Image (cartoon, rainbow, N blue to C red):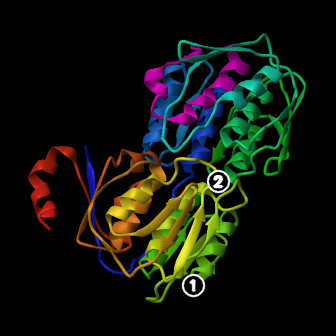
Amino acid sequence: MDKIVVQGAGPLDGEVKISGAKNSALPILISSLLVDGTLTLSNVPHLQDITTTMGLLSHLGVQMQIDENMHIAADSSAVDQIRAPYELVKTMRASILVLGPLLARMGHAEVSLPGGCAIGSRPVNLHIKGLEAMGAKVIIEDGYIKATCKRLQGARMFMDIVSVTGTENLMMAASLAQGVSVIENAAREPEIVDLANCLNAMGAKVSGAGTDEITIEGVDSLHSASHRVIADRIETGTYLVAGAATRGRVKALNTEPKYLEAVLNKLEEAGCDLDVGDDYIEVNMHGRQPKAVSLRTAPHPAFPTDMQAQFVTMNALSQGTGTVVETIFENRFMHVHELQRMGAEIQLEGNTAVVTGRERLQAAPVMATDLRASASLVIAGLMADGPTIIDRIYHIDRGYECIEEKFAGLGANIKRIPSHLWEREKSRYLSN
């Protein structure tokens, strides 16, 4: 298994180009199942989750074409499969998103219960309840969600809890339903808005995206379209936090500051000087140690759970004590135990982490436990004495495009070591 080795090398300093948003690209790619034609996408990140999604869509009969610039053309005119097998679904929870489009387009869908990061329960009952409200018959059998309908009917659906994938699945399914559907207590994330914009470019009639009530007027069919995926706000935040934690300067380019207000407010509270333009954000600590901040994760537009691990790491390298409360996923503090191996002073009390900062951490072999935890360990390694060896980095490759190249461009001492070279290379790191 590949490893990433990070050595503390002083403050980061430089510019980094932000990739397209993984959490937009995945549902938008899957929305191509709704089109009797071709959906052409640009600004798609080159990630393992994108490759997995393309493989799943190809299995279902979508003809996929991709060029060297990651422009993807997905032609769904010949879709002929309705079963998403466990082998293709097990590594990525977002695979559940094929359920609604397949059912709406084909009248039948069989989707394996999904896998993905082990950060907590993300129940599929919200998806099922919404599809049943639109007239589908749904059973769970042999590890598969099996749904059938003649044609979905418009319905009013209330989400018991705010769910991004639940909102996306029902919004896509309702696009081809007969009549008007309303999703109440809908997720409000920017990625929801991006998906709605793409659906509307294909001829759907979606309004209200970005609010807690989305209205979808069903249409008989959707047509070919082109769409550019929005910038990845979580990747942006990750590099900005890395700049703050290392007391350096990082300028994120090709990004969209309006999606990061909660994160930027906390960075400013931590003592960062911020320069924000239409498509860039720069943080500059001028060599100062950040101040610990307290935060509470909650659905957008509040502080995003996907930035929690990075801020825990920054707090561990800050002045003072910060309290971080996680309200979205019950298992999303697994990175804390790895940070404690590096000397971080963190006390866990249920869904709360109390973090007392220090000047630097100590390098240690650590294990990535989920996608965002992986990035937090890289940041920790940048401010640790000695080489930090990060294992299970396939989590990183699921959501960060070229992370070692981008960090290296900011001055980090970071290296990926392929699994077949590790036995030869490990002695120089493990002996330190």
Residue 203 percent location from the top left of the image: 79, 34
Q: CA distance from mark 1 to mark 2?
A: 25 Å
Residue 100 within the magenta-colored segment of the rendering: yes
Q: Position of residue 337 (x, y in %)?
A: 39, 57
Q: Residue at x 50, y 24 (%)?
A: 58
**Tag 1 residue:** 271
Q: Is residue 404 above or below residue 169?
A: below
Of the pair 46 and 338, the residue shown nearer to us: 338
Disc 2 secondary structure class: loop
Q: Horizontal and vertical percent for residue 265?
A: 66, 74
Identify which residue is drawn at 46% across, 85% down. Answer: 289
Q: Is 41 in front, or is 46?
A: 46
Would you call the spot at circle 2 few (<14 residues within 10 Å), some (14-19), or many (20 or more)? some
* Camera sees residue 16: no
Which label belongs to residue 302? Answer: none
Residue under the point 57% across and 14% down: 81
Front disc: 1 or 2: 2
Badge 1: few (under 14), some or many (20 or more) residues near its Cα, within 10 Å? some
Write the residue at 57% across / 84% down.
271
Q: Which residues are magenta?
A: 79-108
Image quadrant in which the N terminus is located: top left
Identify residue type, mark 1. Answer: Gly
- Secondary structure at numbered mark 1: loop
Q: Main secondary structure of the magenta part?
A: helix
Look at label 2 and name its amino acid. Thr
- The image quadrant where one finds the C terminus is bottom left
Left or right of 179: which side holds 78?
A: left
40 falls in the magenta region: no
Residue 377 lies left or right of residue 251; in this view the side is left
Residue where numbered disc 2 is placed: 327
Q: Position of residue 426 (x, y in %)?
A: 14, 56
